[in-house]
Amino acid sequence: MEDRTPEQQLVLHMAAATPLIFVQAFEEEPVVKCVVDTSKQALLEGVYDNVWMWTATDGLRGINTGGPERAKLVLSADFTAKVPGPVAIGQPPTLVYRPETDDIVVSKVVELAIVLNGFREFMRTAPPPPPPDMPAGMELHRTDTLILPDAGIFLANPNQYPVHRLLSEIAVLSRTSPRNFRVILIDVGFSPPARMERLITHIRWPLPDQNELLALAQTIATAQGVSDIKPAQFKLVAESLAGLTRAEATRVCQGSITMSGSLSPKLAVEEKANLVAKSGVLTFLKPIGDLDQVGGLANFKEWLRLRRRAFGEDAKNFGLRSPRGAVLIGVPGTGKSLVAKCIGTAWNMPVLQLDIGALLGSLVGESEQRFRAAIATAEAVAPAILFLDEFEKMWGTGGERDGGIMSRLLGSFLTWLNDHTSPVFSLLAGNSVERIPDEFLRAGRFDGMFFTDLPTTTERMEILNIALETRKRSSQNFQLRELAAATKGFTGAELAQLVEASLYVAYDRGEELTQGILLENVPQINLVSTTMGDRLTAIREWGAKNALPASAPEEVTYASSVASAAGPRLLGRPSLLKRK
């Protein structure tokens, strides 16, 4: 079954008369359509297949009649004779065929437990003789399917025990019943009572793939009279819509055309941000620019560039899997968090930061549940980037002091990291190498592990240029090489702080920012490289042994630096570092 699509799995289980099928889906419409289409095909093959659906608002109705003639057959031999009406017990409800919608409406809305009881009693009786007006050659292979949307509501509610019991009895009855009957339950979450878990077949229904989204975008553009969109733009839009439901994708496309007269990926990212905000444990990082806004880190930026197109169908067909993730470890203030905010723009993906504080709960199992919900949300809006900042503080402590919560969360994360197939790229950033759990150091755990050191002279010039241009100052008015020489040992964050502090001084003096003011303020910046002391040396030793350099040496190209680092590396810790 694993190699078959969810649609194929559902069709096979229907053919096998599997009694209880739970389809976990964000949208019920495609599931219902698959069931109805399957029953219509069965009708062509001589199987008398009826599809019913019960909802709390409409009650019970038949949704697959196949026209007025077949409706007569349903009305003459339906299971509702076993369903008592809610007003006059013992009187079955009346069925009415509606030609305008080609369905059968039950005249009285009945409770779900009563409907299920009717099905149970129906399964206990022998099939009736063929109706007189049955078309010639049609055998009476009677099959009934009941669809129950929003099934998670009553499955998770202990007060719905009669419903739980009736579903269980129907599953058991299916072994000996003379009739074929199945219940298809649909909802977003799958959480049946423990006593029912082994009675229910579970199918995960995917969100629309890029081919469906491409067709949807093209259909909407045509309907709105937009004809100047090139195929490459359609493809980019379809990729950005990945992770949205059909309804959400439709809303995004229509909104984009209304606001801009064309289709743009921008609204898709905003829609995903709204979904993330609802999770409570993930934060959507607003993009601040592309990777050009990050000074230095040439090796890592090139590594990212090579993988930015590896999340689509073309890459999959080429034989590539979606990139799993990367780890950035190094000196604080060297651009790790900044990269996370910029990679989303470069890859046209939302960046989701896991909020450690919001993850922890006071109730037993609450933290694990929130973590699973966070991962499910990230997968729902994929392709996406999951960012964990200072991850070593989350999983480098805990133990018995927290009841083992962090250890269990670490195990869950690593299992998901190894097994998941969704296009979620995990980006982890850390500073304290002595607190990094050994499990993260295993070769192959991530696609890449990079060390961020203090910026080189060339990188300091790049960072100063960006910092000045961002604050509306032309770098042409400054001697960047002189400034870079004067700021040896500065991190990227400290260089940005230098420009910011100098602007305050210039503003207070009523002057424009000058080279002199910048050099004057260099001694006013407290440097991490000074305060860290021997620990900086230890971090660099660790980085040299365990990671690739995120920055290219000034005289070395990216290709040669990767070639020199090729081959297996022994992952370990320098003796100077001791776990606290």
Image (tube, helix red, strand yellow):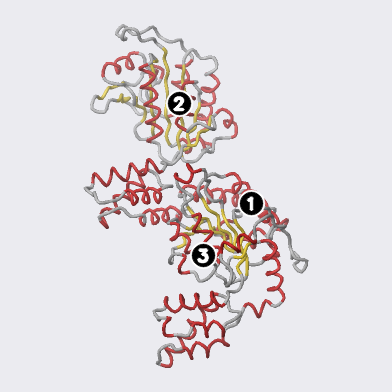
Amino acid found under the numbered disc labelled 3: Val
Q: Is disc 1 in contact with disc 2, using a CB cutoff of under 8 Å?
A: no
Q: Name the quadrant containing residue 50.
A: top left
SS type, badge 1: loop
Q: CA distance from mark 2 to mark 3?
A: 46 Å
Numbered tag placed on residue 339 in the rendering = 3
Residue assigned mark 1: 445
SS type, badge 3: helix
Disc number lying in front (1 or 2): 1
As drawn, the residue found furthest toward the bottom would be 509
Amino acid found under the numbered disc labelled 2: Val
Q: Is residue 73 above or below residue 361?
A: above
Give the percent coordinates (x, y) of residue 413: 61, 50
Q: Is residue 39 above or below residue 521?
A: above
Q: Which of the image's four quarters has the N terminus?
A: top right
- Front residue of this view, candidates 47 and 192: 47
Q: Is residue 7 left or right of residue 523?
A: left
Numbered tag placed on residue 315 in the rendering = none
- Front residue of this view, candidates 316 and 420: 316
Give the percent coordinates (x, y) of residue 167: 51, 26
Mark found first going from the N terminus, 2 or 3: 2
Give the percent coordinates (x, y) of residue 153: 47, 38
Image point (37%, 40%), residue name: 212
Disc number lying in front (2 or 3): 3
SS type, badge 2: helix
Numbered tag placed on residue 11 in the rendering = 2
